[in-house]
C-alpha cells in the first residue's frame, strides 16, 4: 500500500510540476534570472516533498506550488510593464571592459576576477583584449562581447552584397512518418513528396530518418537510417 501511495504522489507531483512549468513559460528552462532561479528551486523542492510524501496531505504542497507559480507569472508580467521593477528584480547589465579599460569595481560587483574574464573571452574566441571593444555581464549571468570593428567577421553588407534571404527548412518526414501539417505548410502534397523520394532512389519511406524541404531550391534533403553501429575513437 505504501508503494502505491508513493507512486501516486510521485506521479501527481511530476504532473503538477510539468503543467506549472508550462504556465510559467520557457524562460524557466533557459538561462535564468535570479528571481526565476529562486522560484524554480522553491517549486522543485515542494514537488520533491510531495513526491516523498513528507507531509500528511498532498493538497498543501500542491497549493503551495500553484501559489508560487501564480506569483512568478505575476512578477514576470509586472517586470514587462515596469522598467524600475525589472531592473530591481532582474538586475542590469554591467560593463566589465570597454575600449582598453577594465572596470575593477564592476568586476567585484559581478564576483569575477580577471582570470575568469579572460577565460570567458577565450571561450568566445578572443585571446587578446586588444581585439575587444566592450564586454558586458548580462543580467542572466552570461557574458556578451562586442569586438573591435576590425576584428568582427566579414559580412555581405561590408562588400555591398545583397544575398537572398534563406527560409527555415520544414521537416516533412521524421523517423519514417510524414508530417502532414508541415507538408501542407510548404504548399506541397503527399503525391509530390512520394515522387521526390522516388527520384532520389528512396522506395521505402520507413527508411527515411529525416527529410526537409528547401524552399529556395524547391527540393528535399533526405537523411536515411543507418542500421549499423559506428565506432570511433577520434575524440578519445
Image (spheres, helix red, strand yellow):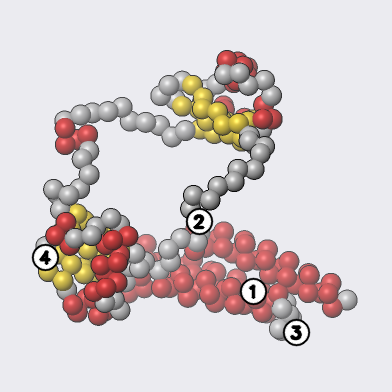
Of the 4 image quadrants, the one containing the N terminus is bottom right
Q: Which mark is residue 47?
A: 1
**Left or right placement of residue 88 versus residue 218 in this view:** left
Whole-number angstrom distance, CA of label 3 to CA of label 4? 61 Å
The residue sitting at the left extreme is 100
Tally the numbered discs.
4
Compared with residue 33, is residue 184 higher up or lower down, i.e. above or below? above
Where is mark 4, residue-wise?
Answer: 100
Q: Please tell me whether mark 2 sits on a helix, a strand or a loop.
A: loop
Q: Please tell me whether mark 1 sits on a helix, a strand or a loop.
A: helix
- The picture places residue 28, in percent across and down from the top left corner, at 49, 63
Q: Which mark is residue 56?
A: 3
Whole-number angstrom distance, CA of label 3 to CA of label 2? 51 Å
Whole-number angstrom distance, CA of label 1 to CA of label 2? 40 Å
- Which tag, 2 or 4, sits closer to the chain's start? 4
Whole-number angstrom distance, CA of label 3 to CA of label 1? 14 Å
> What residue is at 67 percent from the left and 66 percent from the top?
14
- The picture places residue 188, in percent across and down from the top left corner, at 55, 21
Where is mark 2, residue-wise?
Answer: 236
> What residue is at 44 percent from the left and 25 percent from the top?
215
Toward which corner of the image does residue 65 lie, by quadrant? bottom right
> What residue is at 15 percent from the left and 53 percent from the top?
148
- Which tag, 3 or 1, sits closer to the chain's start? 1
Q: Is residue 190 visible?
A: no
Instruction: Say if mark 1 contacts mark 2, CB within 8 Å.
Output: no
Q: Please tell me whether mark 3 sits on a helix, a strand or a loop.
A: loop
- Which tag, 3 or 2, sits closer to the chain's start? 3
Q: Which mark is residue 28?
A: none
Amino acid at each position: 500500500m505504501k508503494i502505491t501511495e508513493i507512486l501516486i504522489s510521485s506521479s501527481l507531483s511530476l504532473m503538477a510540476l510539468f503543467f506549472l512549468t508550462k504556465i510559467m513559460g520557457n524562460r524557466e528552462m533557459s538561462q535564468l534570472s535570479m528571481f526565476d532561479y529562486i522560484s524554480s528551486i522553491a517549486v522543485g523542492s515542494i514537488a520533491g516533498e510531495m513526491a516523498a510524501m513528507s507531509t500528511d496531505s498532498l493538497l498543501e504542497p500542491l497549493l503551495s506550488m500553484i501559489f508560487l507559480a501564480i506569483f512568478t507569472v505575476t512578477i514576470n508580467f509586472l517586470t514587462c510593464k515596469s522598467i524600475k521593477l525589472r531592473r530591481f528584480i532582474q538586475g542590469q547589465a554591467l560593463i566589465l571592459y570597454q575600449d582598453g579599460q577594465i572596470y575593477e569595481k564592476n568586476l567585484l560587483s559581478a564576483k569575477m576576477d580577471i582570470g575568469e574574464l579572460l577565460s570567458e573571452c577565450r571561450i568566445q574566441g578572443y585571446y587578446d583584449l586588444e581585439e575587444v571593444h566592450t564586454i558586458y555581464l548580462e543580467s542572466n549571468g552570461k557574458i556578451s562581447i562586442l569586438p573591435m570593428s576590425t576584428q568582427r567577421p566579414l559580412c555581405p553588407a561590408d562588400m555591398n552584397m545583397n544575398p537572398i534571404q534563406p527560409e527555415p527548412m520544414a521537416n516533412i518526414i521524421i523517423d519514417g512518418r510524414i508530417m502532414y501539417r508541415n507538408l501542407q505548410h510548404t504548399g506541397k502534397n503527399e503525391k509530390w513528396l512520394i515522387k521526390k523520394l522516388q527520384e532520389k532512389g528512396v522506395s521505402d519511406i520507413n527508411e527515411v530518418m529525416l527529410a526537409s524541404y528547401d524552399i529556395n531550391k524547391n527540393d528535399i534533403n533526405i537523411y536515411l537510417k543507418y542500421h549499423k553501429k559506428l565506432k570511433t575513437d577520434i575524440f578519445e
